[in-house]
């Protein structure tokens, strides 16, 4: 069930009044939301509902054991390792088993060794990565005593499975969600204006911008880069940057809006990433909840920058490569992560360190440096997207080779797609608080105006929509 | 000796880059949200009539689907007589012409 569909509209319209009717009885409301979330998940494959439950219940039990072992640091650590390991095992089995099995067999074959490893037909459960992230977040937060282990299985079930964030984030920390789940939501705190702007904006970004750019230009170019002109290849790399932003940020915007309408607050996930003037800034604006997850649950446990600069840079590189691999079992994702890691390392080395010993991170003071930094960052990001989007390493290299060698500077990009790319790009440079101001304006408007605006906006989006809605790009991760 | 430099790539775990906004209380916010959502959905169901009937027809047959279709189809037929779907179809066609260009433009719309 995708957000921009009638099925989801009906689903949400059925859940919304019942959830609020049960608001005085918080347990009943949570039961409803868990049931709704499991129903939502079962639309993809009902068999994986058991996996969802098993993962959540397992993490709940690990939390209880950690709480029991409060005075046993060694045992706690062992339980933590076992808990995180179990989560990762689940992820690795479903996502990486065949990838690593093939790589190992191929590597041994080059050494003249033959190894028979049976490959299994593994159906990748939707949202397996996000389940794992939420599970690990809960276990580690309990271990670190950021939150107490909850005695309510229901709260953990809701935290892991809550349908707005279940499939593609944002990655909400256990310490952000569980306190909200414990309390009754206040119906007077529904932010209708902000939610409406997030949902309507998200629908426009996904249904119109991302879908048109993808189906009418980017998909064709990436499907056969060898027969494209240089200009098309260049334009497609920019267009894909806009497509993936509009696609992914649309999902999380709608998720934040929907959750808010049900009384739960999610963190922001995007903040105009393509206006970043450095890679460090880019990662503070792009998929923010993944960046901080990687920082808190991978980079810092690896040692962060506490063991000197060489180790810090190595940790940064490892974090980014693993972050790349998280996106899928393909070398292209690892290279994408490695490009970002290498660029971040380079930035650290070039930026040097300030008087207090910390790397200078402030935004460039001179306009020339800001523009240069923006140009370099944008092009590193776009070049890395080519690996991310290409189905194989060979296809990515063909893409770059053809871009350099074709020498043909004609394009098949239609003016309409070009206009959509520009609109997508313009979203990066509007005032950052525009959405909030529009939300406030919406809140202040009389009821008929609110209804007219929502109806007209969705009607227009339906008119503009191409036939069918492809899944969100991040569903595959 | 200087203490280790703070990790500047990322804000400290306790001080998130992201703050979850605390909403200002709005009296009757729930009622306003409910009216906006349901009236909007109702209007969209009427203005894009094929959407509901089409979605129902795509669903596997069953008692719920059959009842819903039995309710939706007469409304759909009534709206067709009023020309509401025709307006939607005409707008969509006009937009398709604008977005795809001429039929021989080569754009795969």
Image (cartoon, helix red, strand yellow):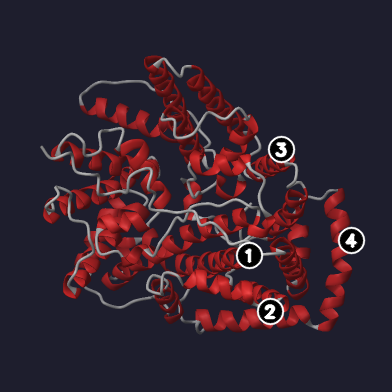
- Residue at mark 3: A27
- Residue at mark 4: B70
| Both marks 1 and 2 on one chain | yes
Q: Is residue A50 left or right of residue A335?
A: right
Q: To which quarter of the image does residue A204 belong?
A: bottom right
Mark positioned earlier in the residue sequence (1 or 3): 3
Q: Are marks 3 and 2 in contact (CB under 8 Å)?
A: no
Which disc, if any, is residue A176? none
Residue drawn at the location 59% of the way across and 71% of the way down? A465
Residue drawn at the location 61% of the way across and 67% of the way down? A196
The answer for how far apart the CA atoms under marks 3 and 2 are is 36 Å
Mark positioned earlier in the residue sequence (3 or 2): 3
The answer for how far apart the CA atoms under marks 2 and 4 are is 33 Å
Position of residue B55 measured from the top left corner of the image (x, y, whole percent): 73, 60
Q: Are marks 1 and 3 in contact (CB under 8 Å)?
A: no
The answer for how far apart the CA atoms under marks 1 and 2 are is 13 Å
How crowded is the residue under tag 3: few (<14 C-alpha within 10 Å), some, or many (20+)? Answer: some
Position of residue A258 measured from the top left corner of the image (x, y, whole percent): 61, 56
Q: Is residue A443 left or right of residue A341?
A: right
Position of residue B49 measured from the top left corner of the image (x, y, whole percent): 77, 71
């Amino acid at each position: 069930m995708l957000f921009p569909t009638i099925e989801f509209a009906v689903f949400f319209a059925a859940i919304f009044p019942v959830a609020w009717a049960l608001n005085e009885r918080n347990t009943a409301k949570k039961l409803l939301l868990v049931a709704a979330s499991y129903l939502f998940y079962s639309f993809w494959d009902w068999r994986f509902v058991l996996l969802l439950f098993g993962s959540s219940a397992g993490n709940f039990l690990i939390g209880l054991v950690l709480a029991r072992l409060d005075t046993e640091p060694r045992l706690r650590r062992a339980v933590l390792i076992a808990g995180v390991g179990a989560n990762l095992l689940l992820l690795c089995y479903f996502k990486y088993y065949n990838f690593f099995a093939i790589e190992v067999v191929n590597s041994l074959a080059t050494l003249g060794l033959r190894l028979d490893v049976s490959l299994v037909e593994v159906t990748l459960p939707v949202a397996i990565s996000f389940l794992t992230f939420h599970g690990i977040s809960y276990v580690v937060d309990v271990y670190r005593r950021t939150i107490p282990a909850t005695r309510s299985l229901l709260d953990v079930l809701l935290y892991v499975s809550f349908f707005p964030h279940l499939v593609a984030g944002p990655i909400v920390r256990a310490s952000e969600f569980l306190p909200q789940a414990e309390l009754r939501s206040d119906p007077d705190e529904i932010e209708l204006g902000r939610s409406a702007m997030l949902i309507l904006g998200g629908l426009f970004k996904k249904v119109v911008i991302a879908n048109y750019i993808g189906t009418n230009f980017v998909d064709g170019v990436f499907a056969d880069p060898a027969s494209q002109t240089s200009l098309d290849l260049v334009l497609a790399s920019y267009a894909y940057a806009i497509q993936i932003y509009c696609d992914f940020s649309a999902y999380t915007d709608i998720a934040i809006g929907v959750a808010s309408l049900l009384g739960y607050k999610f963190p922001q996930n995007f903040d105009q990433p393509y206006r970043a003037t450095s890679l460090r800034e880019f990662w503070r604006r792009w998929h923010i909840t993944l960046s901080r997850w990687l920082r808190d649950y991978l980079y810092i446990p690896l040692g962060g920058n506490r063991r000197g600069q060489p180790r810090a840079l190595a940790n940064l590189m490892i974090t980014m490569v693993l972050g790349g691999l998280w996106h899928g079992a393909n070398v292209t994702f690892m290279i994408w992560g490695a490009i970002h890691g290498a660029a971040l390392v380079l930035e650290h080395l070039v930026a040097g360190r300030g008087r207090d010993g910390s790397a200078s991170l402030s935004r460039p003071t001179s306009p020339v440096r800001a523009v240069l930094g923006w140009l370099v960052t944008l092009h590193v990001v776009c070049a890395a997207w080519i690996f991310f989007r290409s189905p194989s390493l060979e296809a990515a290299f063909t893409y770059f080779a053809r871009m350099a060698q074709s020498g043909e500077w004609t394009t098949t990009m239609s003016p309409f797609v070009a206009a959509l790319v520009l609109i997508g790009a313009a979203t990066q440079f509007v005032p950052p608080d525009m959405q909030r101001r529009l939300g406030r304006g919406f809140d202040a408007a009389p009821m008929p105006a609110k209804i007219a605006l929502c109806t007209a906006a969705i009607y227009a989006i339906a008119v503009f929509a191409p036939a069918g809605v492809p899944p969100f790009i991040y569903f595959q991760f | 000796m200087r203490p280790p430099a703070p990790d500047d790539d990322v804000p400290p775990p306790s001080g998130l880059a992201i703050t979850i906004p605390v909403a200002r209380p709005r009296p009757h916010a729930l009622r306003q949200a409910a009216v906006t959502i349901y009236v909007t959905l109702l209007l969209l169901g009427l203005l894009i009539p094929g959407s509901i009937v089409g979605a129902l027809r795509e669903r596997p047959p069953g008692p719920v689907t059959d009842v819903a279709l039995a309710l939706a189809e007469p409304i759909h037929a009534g709206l067709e007589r009023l020309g509401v779907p025709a307006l939607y179809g005409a707008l969509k066609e006009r937009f398709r012409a604008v977005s795809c260009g001429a039929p021989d433009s080569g754009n795969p719309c």
